[in-house]
Amino acid sequence: MHEDCDDRHRLFWVGVCFSDFGHDAVNVDQDPSKIEILEAGKVPIYELGLDALMAKNVAAGHLLFSGDLAEAVDGVEAIFISVGTPIKSIGEP
């Protein structure tokens, strides 16, 4: 896993998997640079085959990325939230 990966990136794969099951999924982040990375087709974590699933579902229109939370949650049926967990200086949560 990339050193810049945080809990929000760890939940990213959930959106990819839901989109692959045919659901429309929007991954939201308040950091525009993270949205830019995803929109450029770059996968922020390593999981075998995740890059291909992401590309397939973006192309099919089932997977989107946004920095606009209000727009992303308008009319949705479910919301999954992931927040960063503070880590002690010795690497423990």
Image (spheres, helix red, strand yellow):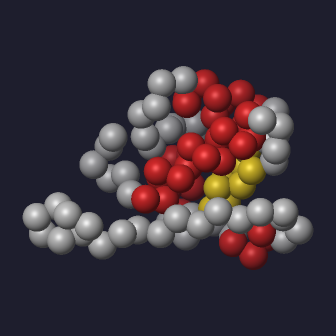
At which x and y percent is residue 22? 83, 37
Give residue 67's position: percent from left, percent from top.
63, 66
Residue 87 visible in the displayed image: yes
Identify the residue at image location x=38%, y=57%: 6
**Which quadrant holds residue 78?**
bottom right
Left or right: where 50 falls relative to 18: left
Quadrant of residue 13 in the image? top right
Residue 34 vs residue 78, the one in the foreground:
78
- Of 44 and 49, nearer the camera is 49
**Left or right for 1, reference 62:** left
Q: Is residue 46 above or below residue 35?
A: above
Residue sitting farthest toward the front: 93
Give the vertical position of 28 relative to 19 (above or below). Answer: below
Give whichever of 10, 32 is nearer the camera.
Answer: 10
Q: Is residue 58 above or below residue 15?
A: above
Q: Nearer the viewer, residue 70 or 87?
A: 87
- Note whether residue 33 is visible: no
Q: Tell me which residue sits at (74%, 34%) in the image.
A: 20
Q: Residue at x 82, y 44 (%)?
A: 23
Judge left or right: residue 76 versus residue 10: right
Counting labels gives 0
**Among the 4 quarters of the image, the one containing residue 81:** bottom right
Q: Residue at x 26, y 67 (%)?
A: 93
Q: Residue furthest bottom?
A: 70
